[in-house]
Amino acid sequence: MPSASRTDDEVLATTDVAVLLRYGLTQDAFRTALSGDGAVAAAVTLDRLGVVPRSVAYVAKIVRAGGLRYAAQLPEPLPSREASALLLDWLETAAQAADTPDGEARTARWLDAVAEIVGLRRAARARGEHTS
């Protein structure tokens, strides 16, 4: 159990998103965890790296248009190297786990959810609300 001094963001930042993608895209029992904890953990991580929501939403469009394998081969899908490397790892994991039209659609929807959560976190900060 996490210590009381750790924030929710810190706990979520330790979530292994790649593992949730691997199992959440292929096994019904893990889909809720991927859609919930996985999307929030990915959003917290990307938000901490300064990624804007439209960048993640754009990658979701690329997944829909070109597929997971294509998206996983992009040289730098996000504005920063660190965020790009992380996202490329997630995309490669998703491509290995679920390289099907259904898996691509699920991954694109998941990326859209991540983008929405990043946007909500940014909007809450702009209003002066606490986001962790």
Image (cartoon, grey):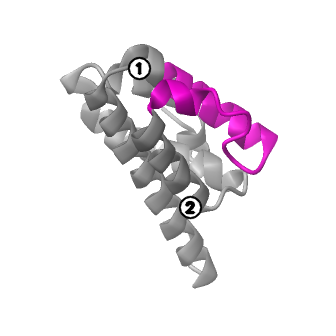
| The image quarter in which residue 23 lies | top left
Q: Is residue 77 left or right of residue 36?
A: right
Inspect the image, locate mark 2, and give the three-letter code of the amino acid beneath it.
Answer: Pro
Region rendered in magenta: 67-93
x%, y% of residue 93? 50, 20
Residue 8 drawn above or below residue 32: below
x%, y% of residue 132? 55, 60
Q: Is residue 37 left or right of residue 90?
A: left
Front in this rendered view, residue 10 or 36: 36
Magenta span: chief secondary structure:
helix
User: Which residue is rendered at x = 56% and y = 62% of the image?
Assistant: 54
**Secondary element at image label 1:** helix
Give the Cα separation between the discs numbered 2 and 1. 23 Å
User: Which residue is rendered at x = 53% and y = 43% of the image?
Assistant: 42
Residue 80: say if magenta: yes
Front in this rendered view, residue 39 or 14: 39
Q: Kindly identify which numbered label has been placed on residue 22.
A: 1
User: Which residue is rendered at x = 59% and y = 70% of the image?
Assistant: 122
